[in-house]
Image: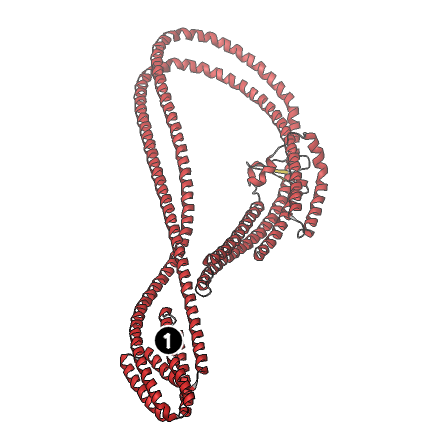
Amino acid sequence: MDRRSWLWRRKSSENSPAETDSTSAGSISSHSERFWDEQANATIGSQSVEVTSKAIAVGEENNNIRSLTEKLSAALMNISAKEDLVKQHAKVAEEAVSGWEKAEKDVLALKQQLDAFMKKNTTLEDRVGHLDGALKECVRQLRQAREEQERKNYEAVANKCHELESSTSELESQLLDLKAQLESAKTDTAASLELRIIERDLSTKTAETASKQHLERIKKLAKLETECRRLKAIARKASPANDQKSYTASSICVESFTDSQSDSDERLLAVETDMQKMNGLEMNESGRSRSDAWASSLITELDQFRKKAVGRNIMVPSVEINLMDDFLEMERLAALPDTESGSGFIESGPISNQTCTVVNTLKAELETLTHRIAQLEEKLVLSEEEKSELQMAFTESQKQLKTLQNQLSEAETKFKDVQTQLALDDNSKKSVEEEVEVANMNREVVVSRLRDAEIEIKALISKVTSLEEVIRKEQTFSAELEEKLALTEEEKSESQMAFTESQKQLQTLQNQLSEAETRFQDVQTQLALADNPKKALEEEVKIANMNRQEAETEINILISKVTSLEDLLKKEQALSAENMIKCKELENELSKMKCEAKLQHESEFQLVARYNEELKVPQDQELAIAARKFAECQKTIVALGQQLKSLATLEDFLVDSDKPSQLEDGGLKYPGNNEAQLKLGSTGTVLPRRGSSGYSKVGGEYAKHSENSNVKESTLPTKTFRE
């Protein structure tokens, strides 16, 4: 009501009443036509008008409304001046009648004074006796009233002081609690930040170590594959004799890697039997078959070794490299005597002569092989010990990895908990700040109450002093009454003297009666003269009644318009309800977007972990990208929140502008210059009659505002969806 009525409350001090009467009568038709034209233009171009043109149109309409309100206020001033003249004429007539009545009353009063003066002498004696008892009762009542007043004042002051002390103590305790909460929140946030920093450093270190170990394992596997390929190539190029001897050596070497000490004796016996069989067979046939068997067995053993190496990628690469070195040394030792024996075979020719040399060489090779086997067995024992140690270290490393993974999972959970705690801390911080503000407000209220209490105490003190003064006055009055008692006794003696004088006064009163009759005749002549303006006043009253009837008809018209405005208000309320539904939908979308942002953040965090495990991308870059995306999500959320706030302010503006002004029946005034205006009670709002420019402008502004609000409501949600 205050927003809409301030335009109508303003009164112009620049325009004169004559100018407003001349301009208001001529602007009724023109403003009504403007109203319909502007309403038609507003309905046609409401969808294409921009915000700047709307603001200019609203400013022009406000200026027109201000000018109309100034004109209406000037017309009201004219009407009030005329009403003052009518009241003055009525007062003159009433004063004349009252003067005539007073003259009659004076005559009756003089007669009554005569009777009262006679009775006064008889009542004075009775009154003296009653005054003594009344004085005693008055003194007693005054003492009781003084004691009760002092007691009440003391109790009120004590209660006020106690309440103020209790309220101040409560506020101080609340302030201390709030300060303690703030300090605890600060310490918690600092501790959580330190934990997050430490966990991030640990995660980066573990990721770097895991990546280095993985790269070293890949390099060692590549080296093993190259060695295997090289051995295959050497095996394919070797001669049949070399194939035969290297087959025995390689089989012994490979079996020495896999079997234990007990298996080595059995392999030696097998080698001796092979040597005996080889002496009885031909060189060409046995060389080809054994070389093929040796190559196939070597390839199968290498494949098995590769599969074991691939399956056991967790094994430490130092043991594998030592085994490969031992295998290569065995191959070299097997290759050296083979070449010598091969050349011997080529040079000698017949098989019978060469058997002895072959047996000798084989015996020497057996001795060297046994010696080499013993060395290899010692190396195997050492390698098995190293293998057991490495397995223990590997199990320990696996345990450490598991513990680190558990720590990482715990760190992630702690990180999420810290994020939630930070959000809760922010909310608690905001609530604490609000509580501090409320405490400050309460403190200000308490200070104001203290001031009011001090003012009340001062007022009570002043009342106490005034009561003391009253008591003093009563005491003086009692003393005066005692003096009056003495005087009444003196007057009793003098009343007899006054009785004789009263007879003389009767004669004077009769003379005054004759003078009063002459005055009465003069008053009658004045009344006859006052009848003429009274008739004129009655005619003006009739005109005012006619204007009143016209105003009542216009009031009915305005009531019908108010009903139409209420219908429009209902429509606007329906629109506002739709806007509220849209706001709720937007809030749901905001919540969904927040959930999606959280899911995106979690998915990005998981992707960062996967990239650290698989691709070994630096974790800082992924965290920076995730932070950027999270900041972008926060920006979108802030933008949506601002749009929601703008929608809420727009709806508040629509609800405030669409509330109709309620008519109050107490303050109706009826002007007379063809412009019926309603002044509504204490608010001072003025409603012009139908056809006036003020109403047309208000209606046009209302229609434009409603249409503009519809356009804004239709455009704002689309912007939010696009963003």
Q: Is residue 695 left or right of residue 212?
A: right
Residue at 43%, 68% in the rendered image: 219
Q: Nearer the viewer, residue 123 or 138?
A: 138
Q: Quadrant of the C terminus?
A: bottom right
Residue 233 pos. (x, y %): 46, 79
In the image, residue 439 sits, relative to residue 82, either above or below, namely: below
Q: Is residue 53 visible?
A: yes
Q: Quadrant of the N terminus?
A: top right
Farthest residue, direction left: 262
In the image, residue 150 sits, relative to residue 43, either above or below, namely: above
Residue 7 pos. (x, y %): 61, 38
Q: Is residue 546 visible?
A: no
Q: Nearer the viewer, residue 474 or 10?
A: 10
Residue 240 pos. (x, y %): 42, 86
Residue at 36%, 60% in the rendered image: 407
Q: Is residue 341 left or right of residue 60?
A: left
Q: Which residue is mark 1?
A: 329
In the image, residue 629 sits, relative to residue 489, either above or below, namely: below
Residue 323 pos. (x, y %): 36, 74
